[in-house]
Image: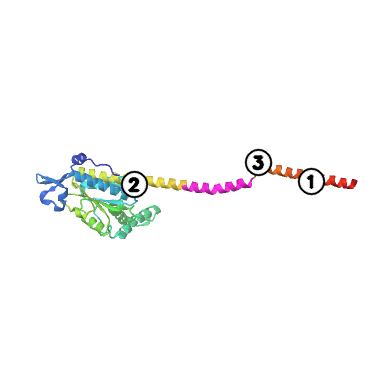
Amino acid sequence: MANKVEVKELLDAGVHFGHLTRRWNPNMAPYIYMERNGIHIINLYKSAAKMQEAGEALAKIAASGRKILFVATKKQAKEIVAEQAEKANMPYITERWPGGMLTNFVTIRKAVKKMASIDRMKKDGTFNSLSKKERLQVDRLRAKLEKNLGSIADMSRLPGALFVVDITREHIAVKEAQKLNIPIFAMVDTNSDPREVEYVIPSNDDASKSISKVVSYVSDSIVEGLSERKSEKAAKKKEEKASKEGKEEKEKAPKAKKEKAEVPSKDAEDKKAMKEAKKDVKLESKSETLDKAKSSNEEE
């Protein structure tokens, strides 16, 4: 369950400021509260509700073990997104969006592997055997790859969702995600089309304060989902251990019972001895009777 969003906090962060009225997208009308001084004002109650909805959905995706890719290449959002994505241990793109990042993911993975192979060259000493010019070229290639793809090095498969700041600027990323049916969560300003994304967060996507407020909330929701997954894993492990121990005890119980049955108790031994003694007494008395009868016959 994602944390409750306070409208006052959104107001203080300037999330309600939209674009100029002449630059608006009519599809954003349901999220616009009013117009003031030629600027559209976003309805913060709707923003808060949508933020919470998006937070809950992202927590579920994170809890399922899938990655959420953060995308923000505009100057005022870069550092904020990189910091919050790292906090949630999620991949992010803050430089130029590499064309085919999602639709041609195999090629992107090859580029990431190239980066790993250069690192191996440096470790095993192969790099030192190259000429000065070749080493310089390899270093430049490594730096370029690190800049564009270093933040997605751990992303071994397509992400479970995309979080975008400014869908108008990141339209290529949005189109690629749409082609692959990857759910899109986005900060949508009054100049953008909310129909492009599944989870709309109506908000000011230009001010760093506003971006920081929304992105930090999203990041916290993902962290919450990850901790839930961790606790579920621990509980499952504990349950498996308990069931295994129970099974072992059940298997041991019949063996112990059998061993107990095989080893006669002291009472059983005493009873057996008594029985044998009685049998001996009976046999002795019988033999005495026979002897008496025999002697009487002899006397006669």
Specify the farthest residue to the right. 299
Badge 3 crowding class, 10 Å Cα cut-off, few under 14, some 14 to 19, many 20 or more, is few
- Residue located beneath label 1 in the image: 286
User: Which residue: 88% across, 47% down?
Assistant: 297
Q: Main secondary structure of the magenta part?
A: helix
- Choose mark 3 or mark 1, whichever is in front: 1
- Choose mark 1 or mark 2, whichever is in front: 1
Q: Which residues are magenta?
A: 243-263
Q: Is residue 149 left or right of residue 252?
A: left
Q: Nearer the viewer, residue 282 or 67?
A: 282
Residue 129: x and y in percent read 38, 56
Mark sitting earlier along the chain (3/1): 3
- Residue located beneath label 3 in the image: 267
Q: Nearer the viewer, residue 123 or 236?
A: 236
Quadrant hosting residue 120: bottom left
Q: Answer whether residue 43 is magenta in the image.
A: no
Residue 158: x and y in percent read 31, 56
Q: Answer whether residue 255 is magenta in the image.
A: yes
